[in-house]
Amino acid sequence: MSTLLWVIVGTGLSFALSVLVGLAIAAVLGRIGREISEMLENDHWASAPLARDVDEDAEKAARPEERVPLAAHSTGARTSR
């Protein structure tokens, strides 16, 4: 074989090898990106408040508060024991 043929074969093989290595790296990085994206999506749902906590807060907000008249505060009188 002539020298020119060996140069062409070597160049072609190095090009093919670099393309294969690049595709392998892209596949690994793509998988890592998908897993991180899934983790962040799951983290959003994991940090959401529980349904019963939301219901309890809504129930507390719906109940009227017991308020002490202002006159009782100004005179120092107690409203209940």
Image (cartoon, rainbow, N blue to C red):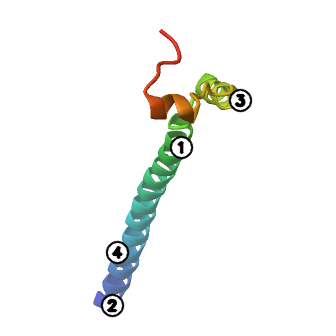
First along the sequence among labels 1 and 3? 1
Say which amino acid is labelled 4.
Ser
Q: Mark 3 sits on what residue?
A: 62
Residue at 45% x, 62% y is 26
Q: Position of residue 50 (x, y in %)?
A: 58, 27
Residue at 52% x, 28% y is 72
Say which amino acid is labelled 1.
His
Q: Are marks 2 and 3 in contact (CB under 8 Å)?
A: no
| Secondary structure type for disc 1 | helix
| Secondary structure type for disc 4 | helix
Query: Could you tell me if residue 1 is visible in this image?
Result: no
Position of residue 10 in the picture relative to residue 81 (left or right): left
* Mark number displayed over residue 14: 4
Q: CA distance from mark 1 to mark 2?
A: 60 Å
Say which amino acid is labelled 3.
Ala
Position of residue 58 in the picture relative to residue 23 (left or right): right
What number of labels is visible? 4
Q: Are marks 1 and 3 in contact (CB under 8 Å)?
A: no
The residue closer to the viewer here, 34 or 75, is: 75
Q: Mark 1 sits on what residue?
A: 44
| Secondary structure type for disc 2 | helix
Residue at 53% x, 18% y is 79
Q: Are marks 2 and 4 in contact (CB under 8 Å)?
A: no
Say which amino acid is labelled 2.
Leu
Q: CA distance from mark 2 to mark 4?
A: 15 Å
Q: Position of residue 45 (x, y in %)?
A: 57, 38
Q: Position of residue 62 (x, y in %)?
A: 71, 29
Tell me the crowding category of disc 3: few under 14, some 14 to 19, or many 20 or more residues within 10 angstroms, Cα based.
Answer: few
